[in-house]
Image: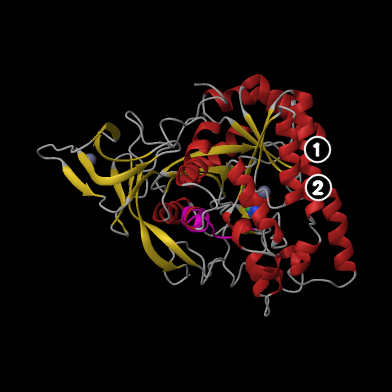
Amino acid sequence: MKKIVKNGTIVTASDTYQADLAIVDGKIAMIGTDLNEEGAEVVDADGCYVFPGGVDPHTHFEMPFGGTVSKDDFETGTIAAAYGGTTTVIDFCLSSKGEPLKNAIQTWHDKSKDKAVIDYGFHLMIGEITDDVLNELPMVIEEEGITSFKVFMAYKNVLQADDETLFRTLITAKELGALVMVHAENGDVIDYLVKKALAEGNTDPIYHALTRPPEAEGEATGRAAQLTGLANSQLYVVHVSCAEAVEKISEARNKGYDVWGETCPQYLVLDQTALEKPDFEGAKYVWSPPLRDKSNQEVLWKALKNGQLQTLGSDQCSFDFKGQKELGKGDFTKIPNGGPMVEDRVSILFSEGVKNGRITLNQFVEIMATRTAKLFGVFPQKGTIAVGSDADIVIFDPTIERIISVDTHHMAVDYNAFEGMKVTGEPVTVLSRGEFVIKDKRFVGNPGSGQYLKRRKYNEQ
Ligand code: URP
Ligand code: ZN
Ligand code: ZN
Ligand code: ZN
């Protein structure tokens, strides 16, 4: 059936204009003024912005970590994402050494099947480069459409890969047409600092931050960038949290290296003092890299503004405070790392970014959707409003003021990291391929309606 979104202000990464848009068979079929058609369902966007649905390149739904599993799965996680104005997520498929990649990917298909309410893709973690892995990677790209590989430079003895693995992944990715993503922190140095802290009896949540200093992130970011230059490859640094890392990305880009950087809402608005909250509440804010000194926030905002950083991922990896975060009482190393961010990513970027004058409206769309869709091979199907694109649409009322709270969020966890924060602007209606997922702030979608996205190779049009 046909829908016409009327009277809104369409915003893309390049333009802002008043127009209606017609949706036929899940695609944007026409953009123009005063569109009318007998029998079409009219969706009124008067007084609202019409944004392309957000593309979140960084989620961990139902991910095993530290003896537990992240609480939001592909159902609750994508429902929360949709409430927040996100219509595409790319989740990290973990793999184990020695396990066929095909099995790892099947595990992620099993987790997501019949659950997602918006479209989704996978990145694949590479923990080692062996002949078996090299033999399987062409299949991963051609058959699965997974065109981004993730390498962890931290989490020693768990997820961490060595430099040879990173370097060979960069070389292989260049040959095959994939983008290499890194979690850039020096895991060996952190491991030493952690052991030292525990030996000295320092077990509180704040030591999670104190044992993962910004220099360890800057060093790993610089190393990954240099190896990318050496391999003549392409790199995307996830969850950049500090000035030290921004500097290294900027340096690499100035040399002409193909290096990109993502930050997350939590680093833009929260700081390290949250980990000092009493009664173990600091554990709610334990993730990696950790929250930093407040002075880093303006560095990150400026980097988004001037293009040194280009995207915003949520790094959604949610654990309940009760029963999950509490596993680390008396030992901060046992606090599962991660937080619930998928729902508030877009709102925080709009409110703190656009409303506070730090970025333009068009930059906001570029950061929350367009650039990500381009880097990860789903543009222009996703990430923009254009004839022929999927009708993934967010009708966003920029005047609504609300307070972020666990009492009103839709994630499955028992706290919200942004509790009490006042934001302006809210998605009121969200469509995925032309179907309502959120209608007038109520979920009306269907688990299983989200489709798996096979993505194009890096830089392939
Ligand atoms: O603490 C975090 N960020 N947990 C999720 C896994 C990762 O490192 O991205
Ligand atoms: Zn329909
Ligand atoms: Zn990470
Ligand atoms: Zn992550």
Judge whether residue 63 can be spotted in this image. yes
Q: Are marks 1 and 2 in contact (CB under 8 Å)?
A: yes
Residue 350, relative to residue 198: is it above or below? above
Quarter holding residue 234: top right
Q: CA distance from mark 1 to mark 2?
A: 10 Å
**Residue 116 vs residue 97: left or right?**
left
x and y percent of residue 147 in the render? 57, 29
In the image, is residue 96 part of the stretch drawn in magenta?
A: no
Q: Which of the numbered marks, if any, corresponds to residue 223?
A: 1
Quarter holding residue 70: bottom right
First in residue order: circle 1 vs circle 2 = 2
Q: Which of the numbered marks, if any, corresponds to residue 311?
A: none
Magenta span: 338-353
x and y percent of residue 127 in the render? 72, 38
Label 2 crowd (10 A; few <14 / some 14-19 / many >=20)? many
x and y percent of residue 166 in the render? 76, 34
Quarter of the image with the N terminus is top left
Q: Which of the numbered marks, if any, corresponds to residue 186?
A: 2
Q: Residue, x 25% and y 52% (percent of image)?
A: 46
Q: Residue, x 79% and y 31% (percent of image)?
A: 227
In the image, 295 versus 218, the foreground residue is 295
Q: Residue, x 26% and y 50% (percent of image)?
A: 45
Tell us which disc is closer to us: 1 or 2: 1
Task: Farthest residue to the left: give it.
Answer: 38
**Residue 297 vs residue 428: left or right?**
right
